[in-house]
Image: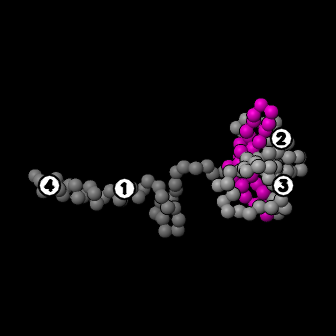
């Protein structure tokens, strides 16, 4: 009886990787799976303007395209596009090693952060845009 139980356990352990392989992971040229689950596939939404972002509700997700023209304090910068300016809060980790100058056109994505008397964009992603 002990031998049968031992053989059953060994078979179960040996077949576990085969069952685990069908639960996601790498999907590429040599992959046997045809699809993965999770994530959003589609457009990122429309690019809005700094002036329009100031009128949006708190925590609204926005995408802005323009220039960062000045550093105000540690994480606070002034973003400018054709409609005007808005303050943007960019944490150090969001730069991802990029060097950006006032001449570089950037696309930022983040959330509108409204206080009693101010509006700023809490930046979650920033990237240079080639014109």
Q: Earlier in the sequence, mark 1 or mark 3?
A: 1
Q: Are marks 2 and 3 in contact (CB under 8 Å)?
A: no
- Pick whichever, 19 or 92, lies toward us: 92
Task: Tell me which residue sits at (79%, 53%) in the image.
Answer: 71
The residue that label 3 is drawn on is 69
Report how far apart the C-alphas of labels 2 and 3 lie in the structure. 19 Å
**Picture coordinates of residue 56, whole percent (x, y):** 78, 36
The residue that label 1 is drawn on is 19
**Picture coordinates of residue 60, whole percent (x, y):** 72, 39
| Eye-nearest disc, 1 or 3 | 3
Q: Earlier in the sequence, mark 3 or mark 4?
A: 4
The residue that label 4 is drawn on is 4
Report how far apart the C-alphas of labels 3 and 4 lie in the structure. 74 Å
Mark 4 surroundings within 10 Å by alpha-carbon count, few (fewer than 14), some (14 through 19), many (20 or more): few
Residue 129 inside the magenta-drawn segment: yes
Quarter of the image where the C terminus is located: bottom right
Q: Are marks 4 and 1 in contact (CB under 8 Å)?
A: no
């Amino acid at each position: 009886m002990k031998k049968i139980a031992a053989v059953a356990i060994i078979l179960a352990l040996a077949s576990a990787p085969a069952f685990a392989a069908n639960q996601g992971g790498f999907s590429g040229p040599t992959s046997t799976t045809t699809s993965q689950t999770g994530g959003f596939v589609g457009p990122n939404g429309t690019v809005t303007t700094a002036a329009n972002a100031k009128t949006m509700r708190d925590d609204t997700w926005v995408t802005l395209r323009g220039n960062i023209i000045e550093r105000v304090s540690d994480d606070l910068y002034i973003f400018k596009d054709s409609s005007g300016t808005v303050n943007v809060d960019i944490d150090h980790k969001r730069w991802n090693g990029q060097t950006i100058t006032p001449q570089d056109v950037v696309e930022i994505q983040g959330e509108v952060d409204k206080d009693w008397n101010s509006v700023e964009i809490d930046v979650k992603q920033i990237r240079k845009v080639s014109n």
